[in-house]
Image: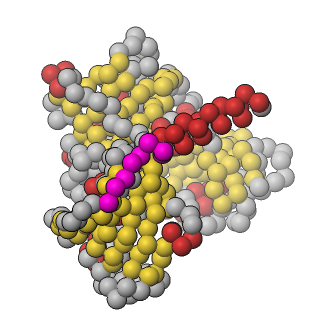
Amino acid sequence: MKKVLTLILAISSVAAFAQQNVKSEKVKNPKTMKTASGLEYTITTKGNGKKPENGDKVKVHYTGKLLNDTVFDSSVSRGQPFEFKLGAGQVIKGWDEAFLLLQVGDKATIKLPPSIAYGEQANGKIPANSTLIFDIELLDITPGLRQWDAKGKEKDTIKTASGLKYIMFERKDGLPCAGAKATVHYSGFFRDGKMFDSSVERGKPFTVKVGANQVIKGWDEGLALLHKGEKAKFIIPYDLAYGEKGYGPIPAKTDLIFDVEIVDVTPVVAPLKYDITGKEEKTTQSGIKYYVINKSNNPVKAEAGKTVKVHYSGYLADGKMFDSSVERGDPIEFPLGKGQVIPGWEEGIALMNIGDKLRLVIPYFLAYGEQGRAPVIPAKADLTFDVELIDVK
């Protein structure tokens, strides 16, 4: 404990020393500049610290005012600086833009039109369509994750027939990812350098069955080229990513960049399909066919309102497996009767007691309907599930 305390004190001393060496001086005859977005900024005090980049955490002081000088918020009056991650959409657009223009020790006055503030929506004390003025100060920076530097490696860029580009950063002779389960650490960036997602930042790698359409096409293709322990940068064109429509934080027609590291590779062991030879076929009133593979003596039944834990493997009409919790080694849990699974599951699982194993043959109208769920489930697809009820809570 004493060593830990000594280390903390040492770090604090270094931080204090760094802050003491940031010098600031007032700007004589400060000039107001205007950016393409409409942001106006005037640096009133000039510091000599570092400039932040997207992905950095910044510590700032601010006072926000309306055009009539009414103060609507101030970290200064609270005596508590505000921290946020630049470029992550945690603040209004004008702030994400403005603090990239500063360096530690700078003070500035910024003027934000509604389009990069709160727009047409009122927000607390801020009326709709308000132009806002902030007096801001950049106090400190905590560096965030950076893209792997590819300078000097441009000549090593490999382009596949599909349009995927990749650059190898580290090669290994480990197990190949193709057709296996790959555990991956990754950070995803837009072309402008903004990070939109990162397993590294969360501290939790992502596991995927390579080649099973569980991820975007560019990932499936790129991961299949790698081996355990390898690192690579993927430059994925939008048609191999989220396409013309985009998804969530990904805008339409957006090319993406991923820095990926293959943490582990596990060969896939396909689950055995249930043998229904000699088993009686039963049909529910709704049209679900089912076979009892194993009937347990456990009296606990799956009921609406209870949380069930289920192992399953799902198959298309041609016998191709499209998903399996057994293969992943990770049973699914969900509250029964809450509409979180397809209707055929709601009804089929409710037939089971803990320990039961059933084969469910679910008609398309109780599965994913006339539309299906691209790219895995075709339109009007009847689905077969081998299911085992593990637990009921």
Task: Name the residue located 40 percent from the left edge and 56 percent from the top edge.
Answer: 138
Q: Nearer the viewer, residue 196 or 268?
A: 196
Image x and y of residue 276, in percent:
60, 38
Image x and y of residue 122, in percent:
40, 84
Above or below, 161 against 315 in this view is above
The image quadrant where one finds the C terminus is: bottom right
Image x and y of residue 294, in percent:
72, 41
**Residue 240, quarter of picture:** top left
Q: Residue furthest top?
A: 173
Q: Nearer the viewer, residue 172 or 57?
A: 57
Q: Left or right: where does residue 3 sit relative to residue 143? A: right
Task: Name the residue located 32 percent from the left edge and 60 percent from the top edge.
Answer: 26
Task: Name the residue located 43 percent from the left edge and 14 percent from the top edge.
Answer: 174
Q: Is residue 249 visible?
A: no
Q: Left or right: where does residue 149 sit relative to residue 390? A: left
The color scheme shown is secondary structure
Task: Name the residue located 45 percent from the left edge and 59 percent from the top edge.
Answer: 60
The image quadrant where one finds the N terminus is: top right
Which residues, given as a range, are shown in magenta?
19-26
Q: Left or right: where does residue 10 sit relative to residue 296? A: left
Q: Is residue 161 visible?
A: yes
Q: Nearer the viewer, residue 312 or 154?
A: 154
Q: Left or right: where does residue 167 sit relative to residue 57? A: left
Above or below, 107 against 150 in this view is below
Decide whether residue 169 is among the magenta residues: no
Image x and y of residue 111, in percent:
28, 73
Q: Give the number of callouts.
A: 0
